[in-house]
Amino acid sequence: FVQLSLDANPAGAEDDDPYGIITLDLSNAFNEVSRELLQDVLRGEASRDYALGRIRAGDPMPCPPGLQKFRPHFEAYYGTAAHLTYVGHDGSSHRVLSATGVQQGDVWSTTLFCAAIFPILKAVLGDPDLVDLVLACCFSDNLQLLGRLSKILKAADLLRQALAEVGLRLNATDSKVHSRVFALLADEGEALWGAIQEQFPLTVLQREPAGLLVVGTPIGSDDFCREVLQARLKRIVDVLPKIGIVHDGLIHFQLLRTCLNTRLNFWLRCVAPRI
């Protein structure tokens, strides 16, 4: 879908505000999201202001159908500080008390997280300056914003602030921006993006002229996509000798068929057909 959106919005080197994509990655998101927000979503009503005041205390909070009946379960497990177990660098297990977020091993943690950030996203993207101009495609804690660079950067800046209110932080290393126009310019879009980013200097993004990954799928120039896929194919080839230690013929065949043989097809599932 992201690839089709970029195809449908071509831009020339003379465009000073071209169409592009911003990917936002959240650091340690599941463990840090506000439990107050989670509880408000399950209650269906905001107990305080959210989204930089775009959601007021007492406003309704959208909740996926059927999820509210599990509120007692949430309160039982997360109503007080919960034990968070993690494995240290030395291989030993540690337990700490955690008063934020959900545990990723919890079977409904992904559902809870997505339900919690949806009202924030909806409120921010409903800004009069952004509505119908910015498209968000999200997968859990990976957020993709599509539109003119100035608009999606404004959306990213507002989301950075709104998500910080509920305990979430942007991962600056994996938060990036790409436009096909970058590759058409002699400086690979450095001056163009620098001029646009001056409007929101606190939201720092890595400029990627060739392309970037969207939920593991390469998006960008044909050469970039091929390089990514060739590197992954090499990883598959490198693993082949390692399963040679499995002497059982049936198990060896099942590993090939269900593990290694499926990887490339999985990575190809959203790549442009011409690649």
Image (cartoon, grey):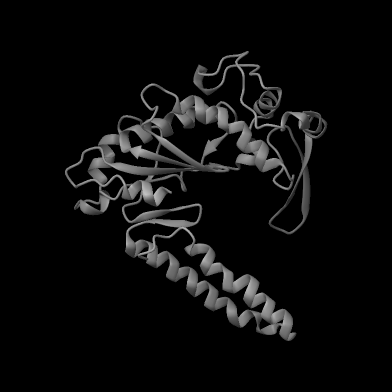
Where does residue 45 sit, x and y in percent of width and height?
Answer: 66, 19
Q: In the rendered view, does 74 fall on the left or right side of 4?
A: right
Question: In the rendered view, does 52 fall on the left or right side of 67?
Answer: left
The mark total stands at: 0
Residue 22 location, quadrant: top left
Give the residue drawn at x 31%, y 46%: 8
Q: Is residue 272 above or below residue 59?
A: below
Nearest the viewer among 203 and 273 is 273
Residue nearer the viewer, 126 or 49: 126
Question: In this rendering, is residue 111 above or below 222?
Answer: above
Q: Position of residue 206 (x, y in %)?
A: 38, 46
- Would you identify the image quadrant in which residue 135 lies? top left
Which residue is pictured at 64% across the width and 40% down the height?
30
- Name the outermost residue toward the left: 14
In the image, taking residue 240 as reference, residue 52 lies left or right, namely left
Measured as percent of width and height from the top left, residue 119 is found at 56, 27
Depth check: 164 or 259 in front?
259
Residue 16: quarter of image: top left
Q: Residue at x 34, y 32 (%)?
A: 151
Compared to residue 5, the image places residue 120 above or below, namely above
Q: Residue at x 69, y 76 (%)?
A: 254
Q: Residue furthest front?
A: 65
Location of the C terminus (image quadrant) = bottom left
